Amino acid sequence: MPLKELAQPARSAIAARELLAPFAGLRFGAELGSGQEMLCLPYDCLTPELEAKLRKSSLNAIYLEEPKPRLSSAFKLWSAWKKQGFLTQDVPSYYLLIERFEGRERIGLLAMIRLSKEVRPAEIWPHERCYRRFIELRKRHFFKMRFHLAPIFLVAEDKNRELAGLLSALALKYAGIPGGVSFPASVFDGVERALYPIGEPGDACVLAGALKPQDGFLVADGHHRFSAACELAQEGLMSRTLCYVTSSKSGAGLLGRHPPVPGRKALKGEPPGLEEIIAGAKEGRLLARKTTYFWPKIPCGLVYSEL
């Protein structure tokens, strides 16, 4: 999409109830994160060795994603971070995330999924079976923490490549602009990341148009978090949940072979292709847990938001 189209004036649509909406995120100041590993993998990808490395940084998201000795420890730490002024709040924004690894680049957005008390969003398609005990664990985590930190990974079908083109244009426009934050290559995946808030009304309005659910979104990762959030919404305890979304046409990162998962053996054989997964998910077909593996994972701690 030409850059000149990004500057068109805001329209009333930006205030509409979009499925994927901007939010006023909370982030650490750049000076606090200098030289520290701030990010961590989701709880089900952590190993004891990785946990030990990440806990060397007092501001790492692992203290919130995998709190010890109990969940209340994380809420107390979060309250302390706010009280000490470590966190600053943005204006309502989408967040552009640029990831670079192995000579490749993936571009996506962080946003909020709006949830309803009545029904799950029909435009979002899970593709893996969930288990009750893991849903309950995530519900308890949400309820005790009272904030969002681990994004649900969505892949837009994006048939006309509208979102893919827009993401590329935004990356050219925002890269290097003051206000973003860079995360050096992480100890857990070697990925370099840069995050840019997009709060300018014209750009946010164009994004809102590209994120309308005419094609729909596959849940690539975070099925239990998504199920937990939807159930809490139906109970009147939650109205939105954090997500990352990229286009199926812009390198979603479905690995050709499933690597080992901590505590589990690697699954044998090739996973289905992305188009096949999307087609099955749209029809309601669910695969066994961990049949697919999208990489890089979207880490916790890029940006926070309170419930």
Image: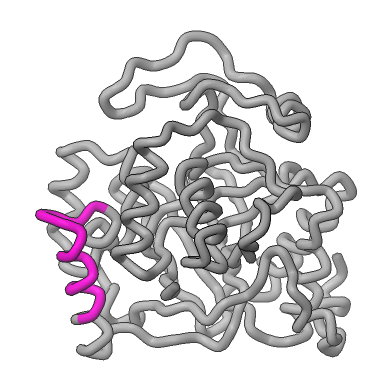
Count of numbered marks: 0
Q: Name the residue rendered at 37%, 63% in the picture.
A: 301
Please identify the quadrant where the N terminus is shown: bottom right
Q: Is residue 293 left or right of residue 279?
A: left
Residue 124 image position (x, y, % from top left) = 69, 47
Residue 241 image position (x, y, % from top left) = 53, 62
Residue 170 image position (x, y, % from top left) = 71, 69
Residue 290, above or below 98: above
Let me know if residue 138 is in the magenta part: no
In which image quadrant can residue 253 be found? top right
In which image quadrant can residue 136 be found? top left
Residue lying at the far left in this picture: please name it: 69
Q: Is residue 239 left or right of residue 273?
A: left
Please identify the quadrant where the C terminus is shown: bottom left
Residue lying at the far top in this picture: please name it: 268
Residue 175, above or below 276: below
Judged by its main secondary structure, the magenta piece is helix
Residue 196, above or below 72: below
Q: Is residue 42 visible?
A: yes
Residue range of the region highlighted in magenta in the rendering: 66-79
**Colouring style:** one colour
Residue 49 image position (x, y, % from top left) = 16, 39
> Of 6 and 47, which appears nearest the observer?
47
Q: Name the residue rendered at 37%, 60% in the picture.
A: 142
Q: Is residue 100 left or right of residue 84?
A: right
Q: Is residue 145 left or right of residue 89?
A: left
Q: Name the residue rendered at 18%, 74% in the picture.
A: 76
> Of 19 and 58, which appears nearest the observer?
19
Let me know if residue 72 is in the magenta part: yes
Q: Is residue 242 visible?
A: no
